Amino acid sequence: MKHANKHPAKGEAVVYWMRMEDLRITDNRALALASKHAQQDGVPLLTLFVLSPQDYVAHDRSARRIDFTLRNLQSIRSSLADKHIPLYTTSHTPRTTLPDYVLSLLKQWKATTLFANIEYEVDELRRDIKLCELAKKDGGIACTFVHDRCIIPPGQVLTKDERGYTVYSPFLRSWIPHLTPKGKDSPIACAPDPASNTPSVRDHPVYGPLFDNTVPDEVEGFTMDDAEERERIRMCWPAGEEAARLMLDRFLHTMSRSSQLGAVDPLSEGAKVPTKNPNKDSRVGKYKDERDRLDADTTSRLSPYLAAGIISARTCVRATTELSANKKIDVSRDTGIGRWNQEIAWRDFYNHVLALFPRVSMGRPFQEKMANVKWESETRDGHLQAWKDGRTGVPIVDAGMLQAKTMGWMHNRVRMIAAMYLTKDLMIDWRLGEKYFMEILIDGDLASNNGGWQWSASTGVDPAPYFRIFNPYTQSHKVDPTGEYIRTFVPELAKLRGEELHKPPPGLADKLGYPRPLVDHDEARKRAIRRYKNPGEE
Ligand code: FAD
């Protein structure tokens, strides 16, 4: 029923609850629905963000990611205020009473309806179910949770016997027909419509003061104490939807530059070398052939923006249709655009796995038979710490780990190399690597991180076969043929070239103060194959 021009003083409102994975206004399904609902009912739209430090501890969130969240919230607050919509940012502990707390706010604001996007993590699903139950029992507030994170929602792409896919290729084949090229972003509108006779929300005694609420600069326990680190991370990852859109444009329309490796402002003018023929010369144009090159800055670097929902995966895929000849979504293996869209499909795949096989997020290997693989003690010989510090003595692994420290981000290929090195060469439990990546990366995302780790450790859905173990030295030559990547991130090796760079001879390593390899790769490989073949045995 439509209640046009209802006076806000009657105290009804629609609330959109924004979470850590949907930090945007554009193409945000729950927000668009909330806006539409508020417009129809002629009541104010209020937006809420609850900082929950205990959740950040439980999910091993990095201080970098929390800082990124706050910076994005500041940008959103200002964009929403321009539309006369307040963003109320608050904090709550313990996390077990979060539903009660949100309900108390809804009641205080006399809200009739709550909208939010679904989070597929188990604790978050339980929390939202509890809120629905409480809201229904206590006050009859309607809670609507909608799919938004994936291009195609979990549950929509199933096998013939209605199960979730556990292998990527058939998943992709089933996923493609669901794509709709001409999807439309749902715009949000001012609520209430300023053209109506409704008094401004800003003048309302309860809602007006919400505009004075500000986003804090930090969350206790999640601060980057080192000012230099903070500056560097902020430069590498500028906040806001506009920045995300520019990152996408950079990928679709400009050429890659090896000088853009390292901690640089990705949106600086130097990064923008427009191409005459974007389909051939741009990063996306060359993606099919060059995406695994670590020495050339060939990928989009959109993962922090996608993980935090600053840009939607739908928007990214739709943007690629502008470049394709027939204006359709290209998902072929033969073009840069097609290959890139296939990578975005991996993001959907791992989110579907998380939603349909939640045990993967509870520390369990997907392949139960791998639960008993014998791991080395994490403290033995300081191997785990050496890996974290980029001091394994294997240059490509160390460069990757130092890239993570420096930028809070790693190229996909080096994540695979570093993860496989930890789990196969050092035989250290993948869960410790998974946790460390979450603690250090700005794009830490449970579904993709868990998927990547279980792939590398050969324990997951569609994993790397346990006997196919990367040789890090061969990989190094393949993915960093110029050596630019290692030289950028490992200062001791900055003057080396060729084989010496990829595998420094012991004498030279000693002279340069670079560590000798922790283990012999061939020996380690044999040990890994033995232990994976016979889980439980030495
Ligand atoms: P592009 O090559 O430009 O790809 C575009 C987008 O597609 C990415 O931003 C990402 O959203 C998605 N994507 C690409 N590859 C994958 C993949 N293999 N799995 C899932 N999504 C993918 N990605 C995260 O976003 N967060 C993580 O915490 C994370 N942890 C990982 C851990 C390991 C051990 C591994 C092997 C991979 C992990 N990935 C993770 C996936 C992948 O490494 C990153 O998404 C990618 O490196 C981001 O760089 P980009 O944005 O330039 O990617």
Image (cartoon, rainbow, N blue to C red):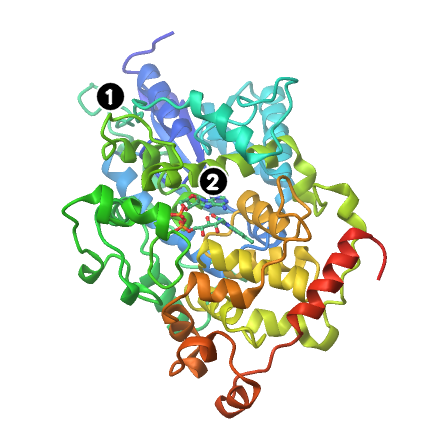
Residue at (67, 55) in percent of width and height: 431
CB of residue at label 2: within 8 Å of ligand 1?
no
For residue 59, side relative to residue 404 (left or right): right
Task: Tell me if I can see residue 411 in this picture.
Answer: yes
Q: Position of residue 100 (x, y in %)?
A: 60, 35
Disc 2 is placed on an element classified as loop
Q: Is residue 512 above or below residue 191?
A: below
Q: Position of residue 394 (x, y in %)?
A: 55, 73
The residue at which mark 2 appears reads as 19
Q: Is residue 12 above or below residue 67?
A: above
Q: Please state, as top left, top right, bottom left or bottom right, where the N terminus lies in the image.
A: top left
CB of residue at label 1: within 8 Å of ligand 1?
no
Q: Residues within 10 Å of mark 1 (few under 14, many from 20)?
A: some
The residue at which mark 1 appears reads as 198
Q: Residues within 10 Å of mark 2 (few under 14, many from 20)?
A: some
Give the CA separation, mark 1 to mark 2: 29 Å
Disc 1 is placed on an element classified as loop
In this view, the residue farthest toward the top is 1
